[in-house]
Amino acid sequence: MSFWRKLLGMSSETLRPQRLDYLNEAMALERQGDFVAALTSYRLGLRDNPNDPRILQNMAIALTKTGQPDEAIRHYRKALELDAGLAGAHYGIAYLLKNRGDGAQAVGHLREFLQRPPRGPEGERWVRHAEATLRELSETAPQESS
């Protein structure tokens, strides 16, 4: 330890830069409605943790809210490659695919979502919405001829 560190009572641990929690920072920015700044924080988080499915999923949500559905789909797919059981990613990508006119893929993701639905009152609302959308897509799907 150097003379100055001893004199000031600093160890090498106190001089190490601290990593910011970009995920929580981004989520706080989203709660404030600043989705563009949230995307910046998510990108910084991905730089530190490129394989964190939570960051990818939340980034996809922010991308959806900023009108970037193709990028959102790409991030949802990457999140699902890392964690195939990520219910929120299945839910989010299903609606983006439905809006894009890809009902067949949307149905698959809605079914995956319903295999492991979230718990609680908010989760029940999402489950009802997913079930209604699944019925709607099943009713409007072209019937196969036998």
Image: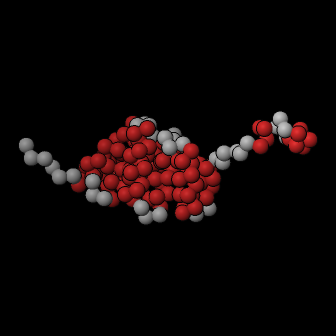
| Side of 3 where 14 appears, left or right | left
Residue 3 point in image, percent of width and height: 88, 39
Can residue 52 be seen by looking at this rendering? yes
> Residue at image x 88%, y 43%?
4
> Residue at image x 40%, y 56%?
71
Residue 77 point in image, percent of width and height: 38, 46
- Quadrant of the frame with the C terminus: top left
- Nearer to us in this view, 124 or 107: 107
Residue 123 point in image, percent of width and height: 49, 45
- Quadrant of the frame with the N terminus: top right
Residue at the extreme front of the image, as rendered: 3
> Residue at image x 56%, y 48%?
45
- Nearer to us in this view, 107 or 78: 78
Quarter where residue 49 is shown? top right
Can residue 129 be seen by looking at this rendering? no
- Nearer to us in this view, 75 or 122: 75
Residue at the extreme left of the image, as rendered: 146
Where 34 falls versus 122 (above or below)?
Answer: below
Give the tally of numbered discs: 0
| Side of 40 where 79 appears, left or right | left
> Residue at image x 53%, y 53%?
43
